[in-house]
Image: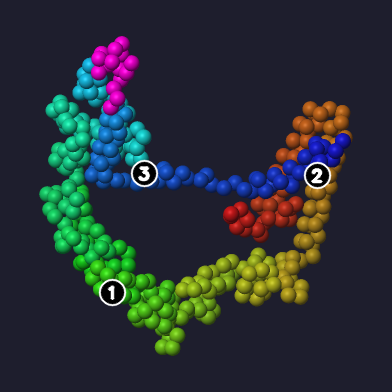
Amino acid sequence: MKLANSPLSRILWSVSVLPIILCNAQPPVINPGILTQSKSIGDCQACRIFVESFKKGLERTARGKFEGGDTAWEEEKLKKTYKRSEVRLIDIQEGICRAEKYSVKCHHMAEKAEEFIEEWWAQDPDESADLYTYICIDKMQVCCPKLHYGKDCKPCIGDHENLCNGHGKCRGDGTRKGNGTCSCDAAYDGENCDKCASGYYVSSGAGKDLVCSPCHPSCLECRLGSQKDCVTCKPGYTFDSDEGCLDVNECDDVNRCTKNQFCLNSIGSYMCAPCDKSCDGCHGDGPDMCRRCAKGYSKKGEFCAPDRGEEDREDYLTTTRYMTYVGLLVATGILLPKSTTLGSIVGMMVLSYIVGAEYYCMINGHTGLLDLKDFDLSQMFKT
Ligand SMILES: *[C@@H]1O[C@H](CO)[C@@H](O)[C@H](O)[C@H]1NC(C)=O
């Protein structure tokens, strides 16, 4: 019997691996598609999607339904009747919006547009005609022509050849919404997006050639891109006439965190983290950073270690637990050659017991087979 495939080795393997699997219970991953779907879109965009879907339907049914008539002449005749028939319109509308993103909004728009579509269909339309203009702009009145905005489709404010200096777009462009003013890209600001936004500086040009670049992360406003070029500092930084904006070490203030926490400075900020459980006050992480030892712990060299009695008891319990496991596994080992079925069942039960017991120990902070209580699990399973 090869050891690698023996049931016992399989059990041992499971014992060592299962707790890891058990602790790897991550929250269900949310499909990002669902989030995009729930994000609302405007009526104009919904109408555009609907029209696109309708056009796909026209293409899909363009070749007719009655292919393979008895003669070429008959086929041609049937095609002609189908082309403008109520049947074809129904065929198109059956598949409408199905394959689209935002299918719910699209369907909603399809319902509202139904009478206009029927009207259009009855006019024996030229299929290449601009259905978008007809439905979304003229009939539904949810969109406007390009570079027009608002209820009455007024032209966007400013020079249409050079709208917002190329650094933004007209608010409500092509829809019945907005007020026609410029909505500038992140780095730009001003009525015509001809200035740099706060946190950016002019790195070259002006007007439509203006290039704005981000300030150093320590600056709120700046003249140029380095730390020394700050004009004002972000919160968490202090101004130094030689060096510019420097990080404030919030941890210099001894009262920054509460009694059983220690302070960690970071660039632009700080955080308070809890002391080790063996400490009563500390100046860092771990049992070697205590100011004083917590109750039930006493100083052993650098460390605060659990008091003797406590430690003995814990050791004793741990040993007993391991001996129980060994006993159970040996019993399974004896049973297995006699009856594989019974042995496997008992094996599974033993396994569940061990995993359960170790998991219980782990979450209650006792020493376990895998000492994971001080382990940052999320770190471990991050890829
Ligand atoms: C246009 O709309 C934007 C955003 O909704 C608003 O900030 C701005 O003040 C408005 N401008 C005018 C002139 O009404």
Is 130 on the left or on the right of 96, as rendered?
left
Is residue 342 placed above or below 194 in the rendered structure?
Answer: above
Residue drawn at (43%, 86%), measured in percent from left and top? 240
Does the magenta stretch mainly form a helix, a strand or a loop? loop
Disc 1 on helix, strand or loop? loop
Whether label 2 touches label 1, CB < 8 Å: no
Disc 3 on helix, strand or loop? helix
Q: Which residue is mark 2?
A: 325
Q: Which residue is mark 1?
A: 205
Label number found at residue 295: none
Whether label 3 touches label 2, CB < 8 Å: no
Label number found at residue 38: 3
Q: Earlier in the sequence, mark 3 or mark 2?
A: 3
Q: Earlier in the sequence, mark 2 or mark 1?
A: 1
Label 3 to label 2, Cα distance in Å?
51 Å
Q: Earlier in the sequence, mark 3 or mark 1?
A: 3
Q: Is residue 201 magenta?
A: no
Front in this rendered view, residue 324 or 4? 4
Question: For the image shown, how many numbered marks are present on the structure?
Answer: 3
Q: Is residue 71 magenta?
A: yes
Categorize mark 3 by other alpha carbons within 10 Å: few (<14), some (14-19), many (20+). Answer: few
Quadrant assignment for the C terminus: bottom right
Front in this rendered view, residue 64 or 333? 64
Residue 65, horizontal then vertical, whole percent: 30, 20
Residue 209, horizontal then vertical, whole percent: 27, 70
Front in this rendered view, residue 30 or 373? 30
Q: Amino acid at mark 2?
A: Tyr
